[in-house]
Image (spheres, rainbow, N blue to C red):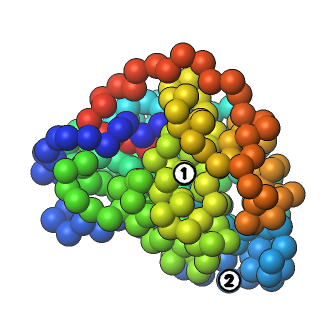
Amino acid sequence: MRNRSGAGASAGGAPAVAVPWLWGSSGAAATSPGRSRGAGPLPEAVLFDRDGTLIVDVPYNGDPDRVSPMPTARAAVTALRELGVPIGVVSNQSGVARGLLTQQHVAAVRRRVDELFGPFDVWAVCPHGPADGCGCRKPAPGLILAACERLGAAPERTVVLGDIGSDVRAAAAAGARGVLVPTPVTRPDEVAAARETACDLLTAVRKLLVSSPAGAGRDTDVAPAPGPARARPHAGGGAG
């Protein structure tokens, strides 16, 4: 989960130049099965949202000891890795801009996630707040484009998995395929608006491994029925 975009001022923790933070080696998609198969079903890369998608959402968390995987997340990552599909993480972390997190906090959580799941090929993190006007904070496409560039993957052959509307809107803005994986905090209107949904990450991965990259239209056959919307904490914007 990423907390919502909205009004608010940054606390000065973000760098002056509005660019994302990147970790990972270049060109992982150059020899991926998705690249070699052309228009086949395997994507050139799969990018995961962090909080509420890969790991349980703990707002503004900088403590590695509080990191725990979401259900089926490790199995989903393993399935992609076994097929040689490059994988990455794209995450809003406005706690940096608000002065609640440092780059060291974000890096410590990143290392813990890599310990739990195995190393991801790329991490792209937006440290800016909603009022900073950057191009990387989801639903803007910058994180996805930066991750694709680092991997050498074409955005149109990339899949983005996330738990709220800004994740799939960022995917669409980048020209990528977005799949919404709702949680109890996903709003019903976001589920209704999503082109594709899945009930958990492993289901989402299984869907994308057997379907065309372009999709065949709106696909919500595995989405859970949305429950009552829960209020998201820290509604001014934050992690993801």
**Quick check: 46 left or right of 236?**
right
Q: Secondary structure at mark 2?
A: helix
What residue is shown at x 40% (from left), y 21% (from top)?
231
Nearer to the camera, 100 or 36: 36
Dot in front, 2 or 1? 1
The disc placed on residue 86 is none
Q: Which residue is mark 2?
A: 30
Residue 234, position in %: x, y? Answer: 30, 29
Q: Quadrant of residue 86?
A: bottom right
Q: Which residue is mark 1?
A: 168
- Disc on the earlier residue, 2 or 1: 2
What residue is shown at x 73% (from left), y 66% (from top)?
214
Query: Is the C-beta separation of discs 2 and 1 under 8 Å?
Result: no
What residue is shown at x 35% (from left), y 47% (from top)?
93
Q: Secondary structure at mark 1?
A: helix
Instruction: Classify mark 2: residues with Cα within 10 Å, few (<14), some (14-19) or many (20+).
Output: some
Residue 28, position in %: x, y? Answer: 64, 76
Above or below for 25 versus 93: below
Amino acid at dot 2:
Ala
Amino acid at dot 1:
Val
Q: Quadrant of residue 156?
A: bottom right
Instruction: Classify mark 1: residues with Cα within 10 Å, few (<14), some (14-19) or many (20+).
Output: many
* Residue 85 seen in the current view: no
Nearer to the camera, 121 or 20: 20
**Quick check: 227 left or right of 59?**
right
Label 2 and label 1: CA atoms lie apart by 25 Å
Label total for image: 2
**Quick check: 29 left or right of 165?**
right
